[in-house]
Image (cartoon, coloured by chain):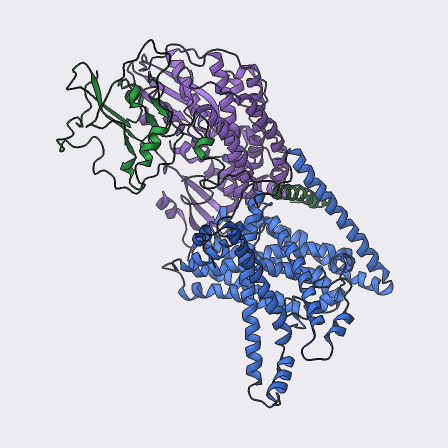
Amino acid sequence: MPTKRTASKISPRTVVLVTLAVGLGLPGALFAAILLLSPLTKPAVIDALVGRVLGVDPATWPWTGLAEGVAVGILAFILVNFGAIVSGMTVWWEMRVSSRMQSRVGYNRAGAAGFFQWIADAVKLLFKEDLIPADADQILFRSAPYFVMAGFALAFVVLPFGESLIAADLNVGVFYLIAVTALVVVGILLAGWSSNSKWALFGGMRSAAQVISYEIPAGVAVMVPILMSGTLSMQGIVRAQGAWPWQWNVFTNPASTVAFAIFFISQLAEGNRTPFDLPEAESELVAGYLSEYSGFRFALYFLVEFGNLWVMAAVATTLFLGGWQVPFVGPEAYAAARGAELIPGAAWWGLEALSMVVMVLKTLVVLNLIVWVRWTLPRIRIDQMMNLCWKYLVPWAFASFLFTLLWQLAVAGTPALATVSGIALTAATALLLVLFLRQTRANLVAMGDRVDLTNW
Amino acid sequence: MEKLILRRVDQNNEEMILNFGPQHPSTHGVINFIVQTDGEVITRAVPDVGYLHRSLEKIGESTGWHGYMPYTDRIDYVAAMFPNEGYATAVERLTGIEVPRRAQYLRAISGELCRIASHLISVGTMAMDIGAFTPMLHGVRERETINDLIEALCGARLTYNYHRIGGVAFDLPEGWRDRTLAFLDHFDRFLVEFDRLITFNEIYIRRLANVAVIPGPMAVDYGLVGPNLRGSGVDWDVRRDLPYGAYSDFEFSIPVGQGMFGTVGDSFDRYFCRVREMGESSKIVRQALEKLPDGEIMAPKVQRNLKVEAGEALSRVESARGEMAFYVVADGTNKAYRIRARTGSFTAMGIIEPLSRGLMVADLVALIASLDVVAPEIDR
Amino acid sequence: MPTTVREYTGSIRDTVKSFWHGLSITLSYLVRRPITVQYPDRTTLPVRDMLPPRYRGFLEVDASICTGCQACERACPISCIQISLEKDPQNPKQRVVTQFDIDEAKCMFCGLCVEPCPTGSIQHTREFEGSQADLRNLVIRWSDPLHPFPVYKVDKAAEYLPRVELGTLVRAKLAARAWDAPGPRFLPPEPPAAPAAPAAGDATPAKP
């Protein structure tokens, strides 16, 4: 990894090439590893491999469990690394985007476009002195970051990356997800309490109040796609949707659009993102629950905060935006390409890769939306946050839930209803998008500026 | 002071004492607030000032009359033209020096540009304290252009030292007028955009409307000045009501708080007064550039080693942070006997304690930002 | 707090509308060119050349046209200029400036010393990059006690004063000193210990 010092000596072309190689290669390698490992580390495949390669019966071989465990361990390692690296790259991307929105240049020193800045930051944080306040609760203070980290890492178990690319397709996937992400708030609350700082305590308490309140609208809003798909499994929900926008959960049902909005807002609140960044409100609470953290522990919080963007975006994509569904590729195509072989052929891997690309692209779009919202909106006050939750989100979430119940009955009678709604809502969204872009262009013209993408 | 509060806090209830500052991101300088809170709700917030005291008034007694001018920059370094102007006006009143018309116009032009710059910082940091970072940098971006203009005019970006007793130091440089007019055109468009970006943002309005309401009589009682006073619906502006310099020549309106989204005198009114004042300042600069008379920029024969006959004078100017008064006393020597500056931020600090009862912690930040206090102006 | 249905729906509508505008503005800035310059190494010109001519940077004294009138010293509100004048031992009619120190670390760049100068010898330049590890190194000495410069007699007939190009002198002074050079042990005025520097007395000489 070239540091800034060596990068400045070598030619700009090399810097760009190295940056591109790392910037595309690192996530590329991780995606490839996930693509390869997640279908192959299933117990059935391991058992079959054990049976075929070693010629022993996996049911009686004493080390079968160990082999399965090792395989899952490798996959978990890859996924956690994926989370960490995506988090770092999100930091870089967010800083670049925000600086452009603020007429600044932003990161541009370490590597081309400052891409290696997140690595430099991570290294810097690791080398920092690890301070623990004198009167802090030692055990809780030390353990709090791991709760946060666990809540983050466990979410990757049920995040789909492609058609059969998922660590474990639990039949209670959504339920599991809501349960483990709540661990994050335990960590934040512990951090706030154990720091023995009033600012941190404020942050921790705010976070607890916020996340617990917003679990309710989020949970009810999630019920809408669950009702429409009839399953709690993440893959099942994706399979119930189609590839085209009018087949997505968000558009097939008018109430589901509302539910998506509610879910998105609640996700922002649970991820402590602006406009709901009250727990670490910089201008009010200095750094909130992070006030007393430094070095590695701070880095963990930071990693989770930005890594959560990916989780939030991927969950929203899965539940509402059609997940990994590729146009023109139905379940039969996957089944046909899969064949009966233990290790499927190239066609199947190609399709899997394609579905992964679709999923990643959709996730990135939602991720950018979250970043964009952060750099536009101010923060709301804690009582307004509660107000918003209980007076707007919860009633609307329940209303859309009830509407969906009736809607499903109606769709069962006339299936065309879903198609009509899907097409109408997709068209409306496209229209809004066009209007929005026109508005953006009007903004540019009004200030007498023009599109200029140089100096990225 | 802290002990004083601590004694009053009942240790058995759930209140706690929070030291808000002096190293806090949103205290706008080194100010300390000792905040007594019950959870998120503040029961009392006592400002503790004096961290930035530099004896600026006392220094005036040892430097000469001319030599004090750069020190006035430091009284309010966000809007340094106004203390400059206030001090120069006071000494001119004391000595009876007549300022040439052109110099008065240049004072108005530089002052109004400086007011825009100061208000941009104020509204920008307000947005930042509410949690939106982007408007702050948009404001700073526009302020940068003003800084460039003022730099071309007087050579400094922050501590201008542009005014002199009897006039101003420099005439307009070549091409400055066109640059300024071009900037003002741009700036008027920017104000519209800024309003759309943040002022009328629903979250922003909700955060500011009905927060820390100062009724008009209370504002007068506490000696608030400038946009803080006008935000409470009191129509008072020194530029119009006690005209000084060239201000009687210009047409401009005084924005007054109307309770647009809440009560008259809430934080939003104070904020919005500033936003509209920027537009008015832009109008004044245009008029001044248009009507700018020819002539000298310095009164003739101002002694270099100025000796002033015994006497006293008071000047009142409308600074970005409200009415700023300079009171100078001379005893016949070449140094001042006493210089006293009355600044808006100091009195604004006084109102924080009575207003803070029942506010949330986040509201306190909004209140401080809406009063637009600047630490050096409080302490001097 | 919404009390009527109209207020309730109105607040939702206002929220959506204001977010629409806000988001479209931030998006439009995403595709505009940033306005910041990247000081110090990625600017199109050296920053000093981008500054306006009136910029008040480091003070510079052109010894060749300094009349030794000490007006700048008197004008300085913080006394960061120190000037000593003596009679030239070889030529009693000629006075020489044996000390002309400007403490750039103390200077507040107000420009008051520039105004009374009769020849324009002391001027603000557009130089501002002079960071030094030792604060005392920022005392720029325009006259060496060993090699004092004679005061300039203004030639009434001359059409202009022969001043060297603004900024070159102070640039040379700054360039001659490494940023981490050790500072002098004593700030001027120096103690009268060194016999080689007879002029550097600690009292300001009597006014001429």
Q: Quadrant of the N terminus of chain B?
A: top left
Question: Eyeballing the image, is C22 above or below C126?
Answer: below
Q: Position of residue B196 (x, y in %)?
A: 64, 37
Place residue C151 in its image quadrant.
Answer: top left
Q: Quadrant of residue A57?
A: bottom right
* Total number of numbered discs in the rendering: 0
Relative horizontal placement of residue B30, taking residue B224 as reference (left or right): left
Is B238 displayed left or right of C71 in the figure?
right
> Viewer-proximal residue, A226 or A93?
A93
Q: Chain A in the picture: what colour?
A: blue
Relative depth, front residue between B75 and B243: B75
* Chain whose colour in the figure is purple: B
Which residue is pictured at 40% across the width and 64% down the height? A138
Coordinates of residue B285 in the picture (x, y in percent): 55, 22
Image quarter where the C terminus of chain B lies is: top left
Q: Colour of chain C?
A: green
